[in-house]
Amino acid sequence: MSTDKEPFLSRWSRRKLDSAKGPAAPRPVAPAAPPAVGPGAAQSPAKTELPPVDTLKGLASEYKGFLRLGVDEKLRQSALKKLFHDPHFNVMDGLDTYIEDYSKLDPIPGEMLKSLKQANRLLFPEEAAEKDRETDAGAAGAAVADAGSMPATEAPPRQVASDDERVAPERESPPARDATHPTKPA
């Protein structure tokens, strides 16, 4: 924090106005570095004859000449476009999630839909109601047949627990005096 008596905003405003009034100091410009001379730089781009883009044949052609300095940017882009249209570069990665065309629907076959138990009532209500009626009729007929065929004397005995097996339910212990009740969230 500064020891000045001038408040921060006043000092900031004053300095901003001062910088706007005064001319900006020219920044020293570093001289441009001469291009590095290498074995490939000895040739001038004007002397190098580049083949027409239409004659390039994918990976079989040489593209170094198109990547040198001084080559027209549109010519460079068209040569690279020709290179990357080669089938070698057009292999899709199997890990790419979004390469499928999800606009084309692949419907679930009808046989599979009918086998889905949870979808039967929603997708085929008429057939489900018919199956319910058949099931109810079959269950009612079976219940009548079972009731009529088994006399009451042959009914299975009720299972009764012996005195040793009967256990009195355990009583819950009363809460401790210092126990607090849980509070409800607001």
Image: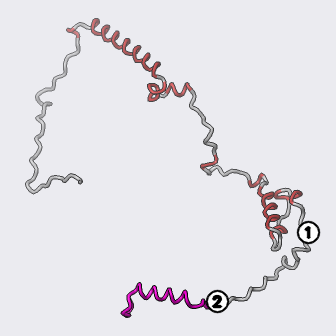
Residue 103 vs residue 59: left or right?
left
Residue depth check, mark 1 versus mark 2: number of the one nearer the observer: 2
* Residue 106 in the image: above or below residue 66: above
Q: Is residue 157 magenta?
A: no
The reply to whether discs 1 and 2 touch (Cβ–Cβ < 8 Å) is no
**Residue 35 image offset from top left, x and y in percent:** 79, 82
**Going from the N terminus, do you reach mark 1 or mark 2 first?**
2
**Residue 113 image offset from top left, x and y in percent:** 52, 27
Three-letter residue code for mark 1: Glu
Quarter holding the N terminus is bottom left
Alpha-carbon span between mark 1 and mark 2? 42 Å
- Residue named by callout 1: 49
Residue 23 vs residue 46: left or right?
left
* Residue 60 in the image: above or below residue 37: above
Indicate the secondary structure of the residue bearing disc 2. Answer: loop
Residue 103 vs residue 31: left or right?
left
Circle 1 Cα neighbour tier, 10 Å, few/some/many (<14 / 14–19 / ≥20) = few
What residue is rendered at 61% in x and 49% in y? Answer: 98
Query: Could you say which disc has been placed on residue 27 in the image?
Result: 2
Quarter holding the C terminus is bottom left
Q: Is residue 20 magenta?
A: yes
Query: Could you say which disc has been placed on residue 184 in the image?
Result: none
Three-letter residue code for mark 2: Arg
What's the magenta region? 1-26
